[in-house]
């Protein structure tokens, strides 16, 4: 009885180890994609046109009507369109249209605020007691102030 349990446990452990190795093997192929994600670069570019031209392809304008949260579509020099996929969001929905995310801080009314982002942040130019920091998402805000020590 004891030997049967031991054999069964060893068999299950061996099968689980083999299953783990089988699942883990193709992960090395994703290394290029993971490095692109870490650098926030496009993961993949897919040509939507069907041309087989050997000439270099130049992207000259974005088709803003074809935007997605993680995608941009560009017009190419050969008349085709090229879609670029990004690992994180590059657009957000504002008034029913996808808008470009721009997290750059700009000076507005004596405060630093995000230019064009789904997350609005408002920072005082000079931090001190009584000057609030405001964080707004989807119409909901959180503000806090630093208290003197």
Image (cartoon, rainbow, N blue to C red):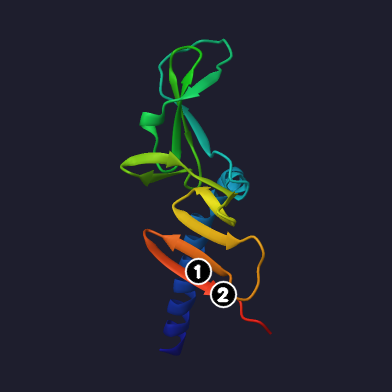
Q: Which residue is drawn at 49% across and 44% down?
A: 101
Q: Which of 47 and 14 is in front in this view?
A: 47
Residue 110 at what x, y percent from top left? Answer: 59, 56
The image's mark for residue 127 is none
Q: Residue 60, percent across and down? A: 53, 20
Q: Residues within 10 Å of mark 1 (few under 14, many from 20)?
A: few
In the figure, 124 relative to 99: above or below?
below
Label 2, residues with CA under 10 Å away: few <14, some 14-19, many ≥20: few
Name the outermost residue toward the left: 96
Q: Nearer the viewer, residue 53 or 110?
A: 110
Residue at 46% of width from left, 72% of height from top?
11
Instruction: Count the numbered circles shown.
Output: 2
Residue at figure coordinates x 65%, y 72% from the top left: 128
Residue 139 in view (yes/no): yes
Toward the viewer: 31 or 38? 38
Q: Would you place residue 126 above or below residue 149 in this image?
A: above
The disc, 2 or 1, on the residue closer to the chain's N-terminal end is 1
- Residue bearing mark 2: 145
In what element is the residue under mark 1?
helix
Residue 95 x, y percent position in the rendering: 32, 43
Give 131 or 38, whichever is nearer the viewer.
131
Image quarter of the C terminus = bottom right
Residue at the outermost front position: 109
Question: Seen from this angle, which residue lies furthest bottom?
Answer: 2
The residues tagged by marks 2 and 1 sit, at their Cα atoms, a distance apart of: 58 Å
Left or right: 127, with 103 as reference point: right
Secondary structure category for the residue under label 2? strand
Q: Label 1 belongs to which residue?
A: 14
- Determine contact: label 2, label 1, CB under 8 Å: no
Q: Where, quadrant-wise, is the N terminus in this rendering?
A: bottom left
């Amino acid at each position: 009885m004891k030997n049967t349990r031991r054999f069964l446990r060893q068999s299950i452990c061996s099968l689980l180890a083999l299953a783990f190795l089988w699942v883990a093997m193709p992960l090395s192929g994703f290394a290029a994609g993971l490095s692109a994600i870490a650098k926030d670069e496009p993961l993949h570019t897919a040509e939507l046109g069907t041309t087989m031209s050997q000439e270099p392809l130049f992207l000259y304008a974005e088709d803003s009507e074809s935007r997605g949260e993680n995608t941009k579509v560009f017009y190419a020099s050969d008349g085709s369109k090229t879609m670029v996929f990004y690992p994180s969001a590059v657009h957000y929905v504002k008034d029913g249209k996808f808008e470009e995310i721009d997290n750059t801080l700009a000076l507005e009314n004596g405060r630093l605020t995000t230019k064009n982002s789904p997350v609005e942040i408002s920072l005082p130019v000079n931090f001190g007691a009584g000057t609030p920091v405001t964080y707004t998402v989807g119409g909901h805000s959180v503000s806090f102030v630093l208290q003197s020590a």
